[in-house]
Amino acid sequence: MLTGLCRALARLSPADPSPSEELRRSLGFLDADVSAETVVDAGYGAALVVAAVGVVAAAFVPESLFPAVAVCTLAFALGTAHAVHRGPVVAAAARRTAALGDAPGIVGRAVLRMRITPAAETATAFAARTGRGPLARSLRDHVRAAEGTPRTGLAGFADEWDEWFPALARSTHLLLAAAAAPAGERSRTLDRALTAVLDGTRDRMAAFASDVRAPATALYAFGVLLPLSLVAAVPAASVAGLPVTLPLFAFVYDCLLPVGLLGVSGWLLLRRPVAFPPPVVSRSHPDVPTRRWPPLAAGGGAGVLTAVASVALLPGWTAPVAGVGVGVGVTLVAWYQPIVAVREHVRAVEAGLVDALYLVGRRVAEGAAAESAVARASEEVGGEMGDVLAGATRRQRQLGVGVRESFLGEYGALADVPSPRVRSAAALLALAASEGKPAGSAVVATADHVEELRTVEREARHDLSRVTGTLGHTAALFGPLVAGVTVALAGGIGGTEFGEPALPPAGLGVAVGAYVLLLAAILSALGAGLEAGLDRPLVGYRVGLALCAATPTFLGAFAVARLLV
């Protein structure tokens, strides 16, 4: 759909396109079906459409507002063109950020494979084959390109990603050095390769968490507190002779401020160096319903009931705010909750991965077969991981298959567990089944590597928790609470000290209510993006929860404050 829209807008362009090399590279990374020239033309075409809309709108406004409409139309047209031109660049940057979260995993799998067989070609192919996502695909492309040559593909892979993550390039060069190192030095070099990428990830995330606090505080102050506190000053503005009209107020609060918040949010998200996105869960997963009407029906029903209740208890203008806020919120929560539930199951499985790898690896190193080691570990590891090991053991006995098929086969124990980390560990266990005792120490080392990687992710989330926590609480509670009180104050003060309110209470309430809902959506999406990257199910679920909390908070604060004014 986006491709068709882009080509349609490109036909309207009056300019000769001259795309930048950055745009070409971004479109290539995204595997886009449109050329850079088409995107540039589409930006100019979209600007013409916005300008035409502005010209039409000017015919319906008073003549005194012509200059303001002209300035706004020009600004929006230029902004639209810039947004279309920068869109692929932003999308590519976001995708690279999410991809780099797998850098420690890529290096870790190569290191562990090289501990068994000290060949860079074998280790590189194993790391690429057992990974998912853009980073693994990039490594696979370089491995295929190096087939039939003395090269492994690691050098080209390092050069491609050196601009975005220098620590990954250093780590891959150390892997190549380890392959050529004497046996006594190889283990130390491999440890340095893994440490390089882990320390690089940790340092970049710590620096980002420190740098993002000041912009996030400014966003909180100038994008939330100051605009909401100024609502109560509307009556005084009318007395001072300032031309505060409802259209102008709604334009500022429901258009300019949200656009500004989106711009700042995008800038913050683009500065995030590494993201650790949750596992990808598709609609084909057996625990995710394919029917789409139940979430829509639940959201529609909740929105209607909430709107009716608000009309019965509060002024009529609260109905659209209540209906839209709760309706959209419930729809999003119901739509993405099954995916969230699957991810919670995945996290529960991953929680026991370290113990499982250690127990299996220790027994394999002592000479036990991998199949019997997995069976023994299933009795000792509790929780969801224990169930996975027991399921794999059961399939081995009933179907007569090996370790790989029992875990990773079509009906394997991990068929419905979309965790790249667990599936990579299972691939290593399958390798241990074929390699025997020498692979045991590598499996034990895998347990240490998984624990180190979880520590890095935990530290990254902890460093950002202060910012993301403030954004989440502001979106769901503090912002709507302040907004509800200020709307009640603006109407009450305007009707007592300053005569008639400067703005109709109903119009003011709807305008501020819309701003509250937009604020809840933008801030909760920003918090989710800073925490784990722009993952659609996570963002949708967090936005839904924020809307479900922000709507009753706003209306409840308004109701209580109205009784006190």
Image (spheres, rainbow, N blue to C red):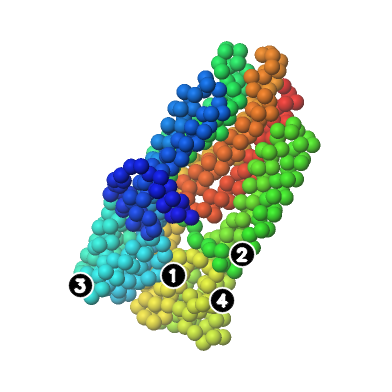
Does the residue at mark 1 contact the one at mark 3 (Cβ under 8 Å)?
no
**Residue 45 shows in the view:** yes
Q: Earlier in the sequence, mark 2 or mark 3?
A: 3
Residue 542 position (above or below residue 50): below
- Estimate the x, y position of residue 308 in percent, counting from the top left: 76, 41
Residue 300 position (above or below residue 148): above
Q: On the image, numbered disc 3 is attached to which residue?
A: 150
Q: Earlier in the sequence, mark 2 or mark 4?
A: 2
Point out which mark residue 290 bears. 2
Residue 546, quarter of picture? top right
Quadrant for the C terminus in the image: top right
Which residue is more in the foreground, 311 or 393?
311
The type of residue carrying mark 3 is Pro
Q: Left or right of 164: which side holds 87?
A: right
- Estimate the x, y position of residue 448 in percent, counting from the top left: 41, 64
The type of residue carrying mark 4 is Ala
Disc 2 or disc 4, which is closer to the eye?
2
Q: Left or right of 309: which side holds 370?
A: left
Q: At 43% from the left edge and 69% from the top edge, which residue is drawn?
A: 424
Q: On the image, numbered disc 1 is attached to which residue?
A: 425
- Estimate the x, y position of residue 421 in percent, counting from the top left: 45, 65
Crowding near pointer 2: few (<14 within 10 Å), some, many (20+)?
few
Disc 2 or disc 1, which is closer to the eye?
2
